[in-house]
Image: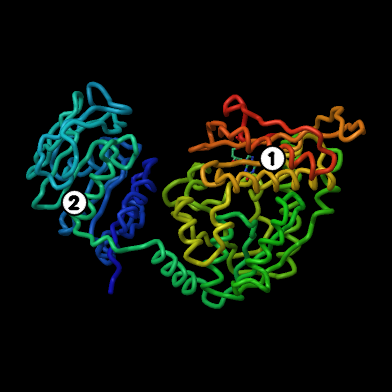
Amino acid sequence: MQQEKVIVIDFGGQYNQLVARRVRENNVYCEIYSYKTDLSKIREMNPKGIILTGGPNSVFEEDSATAPKELFEMGIPVLGLCYGAQLMMHVLGGKVDHAPEGEYGKTAMTVDDAESLVFQGVAKDSVVWMSHHDYISAVAPGFHITAHTDNCPVAAAENKEAGLYAMQYHPEVLHSEFGKEMLQNFVLKVCGCSGDWKMEDFAERTIAEIREKVGNGKVLLALSGGVDSSVAAGLLSRAIGRQLTCVFVDHGLLRKNEGDEVEAVFGEKGDFDLNFIRVNAQERYYSKLAGVTEPEQKRKIIGEEFIRVFEEEAKKIGTVDYLAQGTIYPDVVESGLGGESATIKSHHNVGGLPEYVDFKEIIEPLRNLFKDEVRKVGLHLGIPEELVMRQPFPGPGLGIRIIGEVNAEKVAIVQDADYIFREEMKKAGLNKTAGQYFAALTNMRSVGVMGDERTYDYAIALRAVNTVDFMTADVVEIPYEVLKTVTSRIINEVSHVNRVMYDITSKPPGTIEFE
Ligand code: XMP
């Protein structure tokens, strides 16, 4: 049976993946295609619905992204958002003009047709997210206006018989109060989707696709032990088994026991069928980092050394057909290449990698997913929850959580302190709510007294923050009792530490990391 799906047609807007995600949240499978996709291909896919996204163009410009009239005449429901809405009107004989006043941001909207299927369960007056300078000044024949705002006579319109719906605003953005409901109404009530798709189906389907694409070719993956590369490894392993080789570089800057944990899951004794190569490059990294104190320079050295090590391993394997990467959607956005463009994970630590390795093509099975979706796939594949749910950890690892020079002794100190902190956070149940938390080793030494002895040892800094977008972060208010327990355990159990401090600086002015 053909899988029920809704397709999103990409006109270059910034929220396109968010649209797809909102559809998937209704348990309906969704894929994104460029506006250049052939109509015949779309027909062949036989989607239950089509959503046209926003985009940077104006319908008046000569070479604007456009859609053929036939797209609206296939008997498949179409929802146009922002530019997509204007385009629908423009193509079908309505009128689009430069608005006397554009609308940007939260805008009050009034629903004029409470009977509209897309406005079921939506308040008459609510806030929507607008971002436009052109507007629809007259609807196309067969359409009627279903909502307006002060500056926008056609905030929404529809031709119910033809299954065509236009929304000038962005329902996919959370600032649109009832946006989720509106998209859900379109997908379930207008398109008639059953909503029985699950993330597990994505995993199974992706596995089948990888198998077909790779054939009996060879695939190489740099496994960091982070969520994304681990889930990518899981999918590839299930798809092609030993045709996959994962190279895991232990740079000696991982958290305590982490290298062994990754090996336990993906190594010979783990549940995944693949070739696992662990490179113990600790000493190599420490000698490169000797005497280096500047954070950016440390990052650079760690990144370059990774490429060297990986390149050496890749050479031993010889030519591979594919290089796999755990790129997820936010990476695509960060690197500024949305839509169709091919991109390389722009991680500071893995950047540039493919130039060093002999391969034909890149495979990025998680490219369209958000982090929480990747985690669902990971759990489905049977990757341990500890690994799948783990907090973000920077590529350069503890290298940027040790102020000043990095060496084996300092790494051991920060690993032990961090381990205790994580253990106590877990005991207190705070691991579920705190976004990112860790211990860092300051470069400060001071006088202390332990027993009868005078000490001259390091200070550990603890940091715990919550963040939505990583651009700003709030400090977690850890109960005093937890901080006291962590402090006394660190002082008692970790040599060369005689003070522990809790950093209560938010971001900005601080950063999340402590470097
Ligand atoms: P900052 O410290 O810049 O961190 O507020 C924001 C987020 O990015 C992570 N981070 C890094 N991740 N390589 C990485 O892979 C890096 O060099 C790096 N520096 C910071 C940090 O852990 C936080 O989640």
Rendering quarter of residue 123: top left
Picture layout, residue 7 above or below residue 150: below
Single out the residue that lies furthest toward the front: 451
59, 276: nearer the viewer: 276
Query: Is residue 277 found left or right of 132 in the rendered image?
Result: right
Residue 232 in which image quadrant: bottom right
Residue 362 visible in the current orientation: no
Residue type beneath disc 2: Lys
Residue at the image position 66 percent from the left and 41 percent from the top:
438
Residue 167 locus on image (x, y percent):
22, 40
Residue bearing mark 1: 486
Instruction: Please report the residue visible at 24 percent of the width from the left and 45 percent of the height from the top.
Output: 181
- Find the distance from the CA under tag 1 to the CA under tag 2: 66 Å
Q: Residue furthest top?
A: 100
Q: Is residue 404 left or right of residue 184?
A: right
Residue 299 vs 25, above or below: the answer is above
Q: Is residue 444 left or right of residue 111?
A: right
SS for callout 2: helix
Disc on res. 415: none
Question: Where is residue 363 drawn, in percent x and y?
Answer: 53, 62
Q: Which mark is residue 69?
A: 2
For ligand 1, tell me if the residue under mark 2 lies within 8 Å: no
| Secondary structure state at the residue bearing disc 1 | helix
Q: Residue at x 88, y 35 (%)?
A: 451
Residue 512 drawn above or below residue 24? above
Q: Earlier in the sequence, mark 1 or mark 2?
A: 2
Please tell me which residue lies in front, 10 or 182.
Answer: 182
